[in-house]
Image (tube, rainbow, N blue to C red):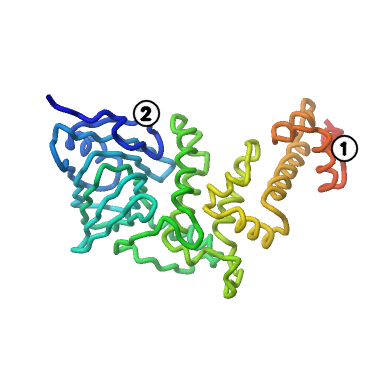
Amino acid sequence: MNLVPHRNSLPSLLFGDRIAVVDRTADAVAQRIAPVLPLRVSYKPIGPEADFVHRSRVVRINDLELMGASTTPLEVDARLSNTPLLVIPVHGAFKASIDGCDYECRAGHSACLLPAAQWRIKTEITSVLVISINQERMQRLTQVMLGRPHGTEHQFEWHRPHLLALHAGGLAFERMFTHVGNMLDSLIEEPDLLDKSGLDDMIYRIVAMMLQPDLFVDRPDDPKSTGKFQSAPLIVACDYIRDNLDKRIGLSDLEQVSGMSARNLQYLFQKKYGCSPMRWLTQQRLESAKQQLLNANGRTKVTVVASGLRFSNLGNFSRLYQEQFGELPSTTLDRATAGQ
């Protein structure tokens, strides 16, 4: 009797677990994934072939390809790869071999950036996140995040493999990707919304920090910190706030998406904006409310605008609005609709 592992015997995918595709032969995995990821690989089960199970889900967000996969022990041999791949263990471990050197990666500890070259991976029972990286896009975004002038070259050794820590400089990348996985799950069956979500840009920002954390972290306890560049975790947190003003956001959400502790987030927001993260969130919601009221039509109501931005108390909303803009929201609305 063949004892084929049930899907529940494999670790969960970072995203798409509910709708993952199950393959029970290595050839089936190769045929299905080859048209999606930019590499030519062969797959070989480690152990009895009858026990082999591979579950995966591939998603594309604009020009970014991601794959979540969990598998019984497997050997992956890449004969040709057209782009760098970041392989992050979510559960278990794997060993990557490139040019005679081995790189061991384990969930919670390290990941591996594989160059566009020949390489081999051997896994345990494991779950991984695979990110196909557009090198030029990463280069441009890194320059923007560092505040460097357009056209300034930023060198990174893409031609060689890199063993990358999942916790570095106070940044918890593992926690960031868990948050990304949750967001992917909420949008994975809505490809149009997924493309508009900006999630690909968020992923690229996290990867940029992961590749070179020392370039981005402006630590409050570092006396040599110049403050010349805006902290990348702060950029990620602010982008998340702006994109989710209509949703419940707590400090724990900002910790997850930025990978920073609440203490460091408080420091970064105070240093940049002179207020706490939650106060800055309120200010952004009020700014959004003002824009909605200024662009109002005859059917716009202050109560609807306020509730849509998660202000549950109209009186409190009006007080905060007046403090920030010097007039009541109803005054802004009346002025905007006066000529209609």
Residue in the image at 61% along x and 69% along y? 227
Q: In terms of sequence position, does the residue under pointer 2 or pointer 1 come before the other? A: 2
Point out residue 51 in the picture as x, y percentages from the top left corner: 17, 33
Q: Is residue 336 left or right of residue 92?
A: right
Q: In the image, what residue type sits under mark 2?
A: Ile
Point out residue 222 in the picture as x, y percentages from the top left corner: 57, 71
Q: Is residue 90 left or right of residue 147?
A: left
Which image quadrant: the N terminus? top left
Residue in the image at 13% along x and 35% along y? 49
Point out residue 178 in the picture as x, y percentages from the top left corner: 46, 43
Q: Taking 136 as reference, is 256 above or below it?
A: above
Badge 2 is on which residue?
Answer: 19
Residue in the image at 57% along x and 65% along y? 219
Q: Quadrant of residue 233?
A: bottom right
Label 2, label 1: how far apart the Cα atoms are = 50 Å
- Between 319 and 53, which is closer to the camera in this rendering? 53
Q: Is residue 265 left or right of residue 322?
A: left
Q: In the image, what residue type sits under mark 1?
A: Thr
What is the count of numbered marks? 2
Q: Taking 269 as reference, is 283 above or below it?
A: above
Q: Quadrant of residue 265?
A: bottom right
Which image quadrant: the C terminus? top right
Mark 2 is surrounded, within 10 Å at the Cα level, by few (under 14), some (14 to 19) or many (20 or more) other residues, namely: few
Badge 1 is on which residue?
Answer: 331
Which element type, helix, strand or loop, lies under badge 2? helix
